[in-house]
Image (tube, rainbow, N blue to C red):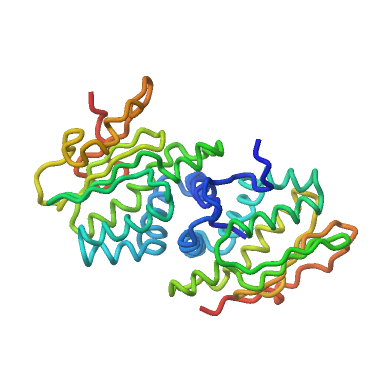
Amino acid sequence: MSASPLPYTDTKPQGSADFYYATNATFRFLLARLGEDGWRRYLRDLGRDYFAPVNRAWRAGGLPAVAAYWRAFFAAEPGGEVEVRELPERVEIKVRVCPAILHLRAGNRGIVREYCRHCHILGEARAAEAGLQMRLSGGDGACVHTYATPAAALPPQDPAAIREVAS
Amino acid sequence: MIGCHDFCGHYEWTFAWLERAGGHPLVRDYWDAAINRDSQRHARELIEREGFAGMEKYWGHTLLEESPDLGFNITTSPGVFRIDMHDCPSKGFLRRNGLEQYRDYCDHCMGWTGPMMREAGFVIDHEHNHRGQCWWEMRRAAEKGGHAAPGSVSGAKDVRLRPDWRPPGAVLDRYVKQTDPDRKSPPAS
């Protein structure tokens, strides 16, 4: 069993950034073929199913497991600048430079304007499986993710707090 | 956030999700529209423009980035571009992590490179053994030949010379001068 907080690990320390092209293209495809509802359904299913081992680890380990996961996650992503802070009742992930948006822009790729919303839709589905809440603010290259226990009583997600990507 | 360090995992999961959502036609559409025409448009443009030289540039860069320990070999000969994959970084990731949602992950390679090659004027001879090993030969569509004898193009680097290329019970998927992911040939005897 891997000691990494990541459920799926590679032999390389970091992934290949060109794969962000495929994620962006997948979103464009799903939005075009299945509409926004289909895209949302895809992300929620991905969060509950593919990420089930992480969700279980979060449920068992609470916020320290959430913090450990995101530290390991961004260490394995190339090019980002991220700080993970453990606070009472919440973990804040301050993404100063989003590695995906950075690479997509460097590659002159048209980014789907909904791109940053995927972090909330996916994160919310995963957090719910772990008995947590997730909120997102910012976007378009810099944002803050918050994972919190119910005791934090976070206000509902403000959709306007998530910026669209300006390609 | 969806990351790139475990890309092959959620990519493979996506094939199965798409098949449930829209059947096999939606999976094929995804490989062509999203991967060939969007994500990998840099490969497409390079190979359309430069042919064999474009293949060498694209796969030389991509495979080196994904497989820095050189689990592959590229051979360029007159009229043919060949890849021998001895340790596929992508299938290897799935096997090491026990991930298998879709019936044949390896089909995605023909799924996106097939349409790309067809439109650039090439056809593909290919076999994969579902164990992270495969080989590819690209030739101009009008060119004769295909399925060159083991060792005749890439010498000792030919993946078919490995003792574990076809272990008992392994099923080889085989394509002959093809660009359509659904047109597999019967296995060679």
Residue in the foreground of this view, choosing between B48 and A124: B48
Q: Can residue B21 be seen in this view?
A: no
Q: Is residue A11 visible?
A: yes
Residue B24 figure quarter: top left
Q: Percent from the top left, x then y, of residue B81?
A: 21, 50
Q: Which residue lies furthest to the bottom in this view?
A: A166
Q: How many labels does the image show?
A: 0
* Left or right of residue B59: residue A82: right
Q: Looking at the image, which residue is at 34% across and 42% down?
A: B85
Residue A139 figure quarter: bottom right
Q: Percent from the top left, x then y, of residue B95?
A: 50, 37
Residue in the foreground of this view, choosing between A35 and A144: A144
Q: Looking at the image, which residue is at 39% across and 41% down?
A: B106
* Left or right of residue A111: residue A144: right
Q: Percent from the top left, x then y, of residue B181?
A: 31, 45
Q: In this view, does B153 lie above or below A76?
A: above
Q: Which residue lies furthest to the top in this view?
A: B168
Residue A94 figure quarter: bottom right
- The quadrant of the rendering that contains the N terminus of chain A is top right
Q: Looking at the image, which residue is at 42% across and 51% down?
A: B68
Q: In this view, does B169 lie above or below A89?
A: above
Q: Percent from the top left, x then y, of residue A24?
A: 50, 64
Q: Looking at the image, which residue is at 55% across and 79% down?
A: A166
Q: In this view, does B27 lie above or below A28?
A: above
Q: Which residue lies furthest to the right in this view?
A: A151
* Left or right of residue B100: residue B177: left
Residue in the foreground of this view, choosing between B139 and A26: B139
